[in-house]
Each structure stands twice: as structure tokens, then as C-alpha cells.
Image (cartoon, rainbow, N blue to C red):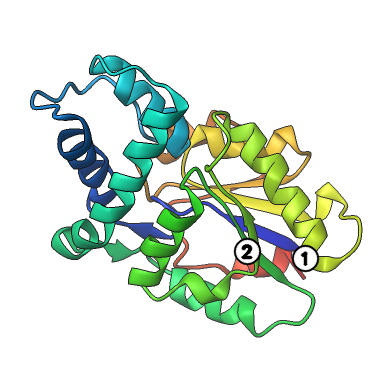
Amino acid sequence: MPIILFDIDGTLVRTGGAGKFAMELALTTAFGVTELRDEVKYSGRTDVAISRDLLRVHGVDPTLENQTKLRDEYLSHLPGSLMSKGGEVCPGVPELLASLAGKSGVVLGLLTGNVRAGAQHKLGYFQLWDFFRCGGFGDDHYDRDDVARSALAGARAHVGRDVDPSDVWVIGDTPLDVSCARAIGANAVAVATGWHSVEELAGCAPDLIFSNLSDHSELLAAWG
């Protein structure tokens, strides 16, 4: 039984920077930050790690209370940010999900640095949320590998039995997606629809690599 875990940003959808915009707006509305510094990396990281670093860089004590306050403010701004930025579903994604959703024995899940509520906002906006049955999210984990472990545990809970990691496929657009797949013994599929080129992703030695998911025949063959 293949268990297929998708990253969100840059893999399933491109939000036009809606998440970053909402997070930085939250810094202003929650903490009065007026001069934003572009020193924090977002790509492939978890929301809690991003929020912790944003607070620190902008001179706010990154206590758990302040991180929670920033998260809640971010979530309040995210729906409006998604609407204003527009964004798009990545090429081939709707067709791939539709073909997998109709197959018995296939489990579709998420492995994302987004907090769960943020993931639901983003995928709900693009009408993709209902495809997924389990997942690992960035609510409690600073390290992407820990999100992968959480996603694997969630998949086991969903199917009600142990899961062989060799039956798990992680699809993502960053080197961190590849490395977190390896951390749980899963297969890694890299897709260059985010910020990283095919050449850069190839250097991480994924099992499969694509410029986008428009032609997913090779994936369907690998999953039987």
C-alpha cells in the first residue's frame, strides 16, 4: 500500500507569497514591528521555526507565548492574504490527485511545515484539502525531520497497522523535503516547482525528480 505524503508550498500550490506576507503583517499588527528585515529563510522550514526566528531578528523575545500570539495573528491574516495574492495550483497536481483518489490501497497525506490550520486555509482556498487523510504538520516541530516522523506516525494511525517506510513516498520541492524523507527511510520525489532548480534538487539524490508533475506516468508506475 503506497502512502504518499505531499509538501504544500511550491509542491501542491504556489500562493504568490501569501504566507510570508501574512506572517510579516502579523509581526506588525501583533508586535508593532514597522521595519521588516529580510533575514529569515522560509523555504522548506516549519512555521514555528520561522516565527521563532522572525521574533528574534526583530527584537521580540521568542517566548512560547509570543510565538503563539504571532501564529494566531498570522492565521487571522492568511485568508485575506490568499485572496489578495491569488496564486495557483502547481501543474499536474489536480490530475494526479484525482487519479490517486480513485485508487484503492493508496493513502494520500501531507508532510508540511505549515501549522495544520494554515495548511487547511491554503489547501481549502485551492479546493485541495479534502484529498488528504492524514499528515504531519509544523505546529510543534522546529525540525523538518520531526515533522516527517509525525507524518509517518499519523499514517500508521490512519491505516491502523505498522507501515513499512519503503512504502512511503515524500513529494516536495526543497532539499529539506528529500532529507526528511531519508530521516524516516522513505522514498523521495523532488519537483522543481518551487524555489529550487532541477539541478540543485538532483544534488540531493532523490529517487525521482521532475520539473513539474504534469506527466505523472512514471510516478503511477512506481506506485503500481
Q: Amino acid at mark 1?
A: His
State the mark number for residue 30: none
Q: Which residue is mark 1?
A: 158
- Position in image of residue 23 (x %, y %): 27, 40
Q: Is residue 20 above or below residue 105?
A: above
Q: Which residue is mark 2?
A: 218
Give the mark, 2 or 1, whose residue is nearer the N terminus: 1
- Position in image of residue 29 (x %, y %): 16, 39
Relative placement, left or right, of 39 versus 150 is: left
Is residue 101 or residue 51 the one in the foreground?
51
Q: Amino acid at mark 2?
A: Glu
Of helix, strand and loop, which one carries label 1? helix
Is residue 53 or residue 11 the one in the foreground?
53
The residue shown at (44%, 63%) is: 120
Is residue 53 or residue 105 the one in the foreground?
53
Quarter of the image holding residue 57? top left
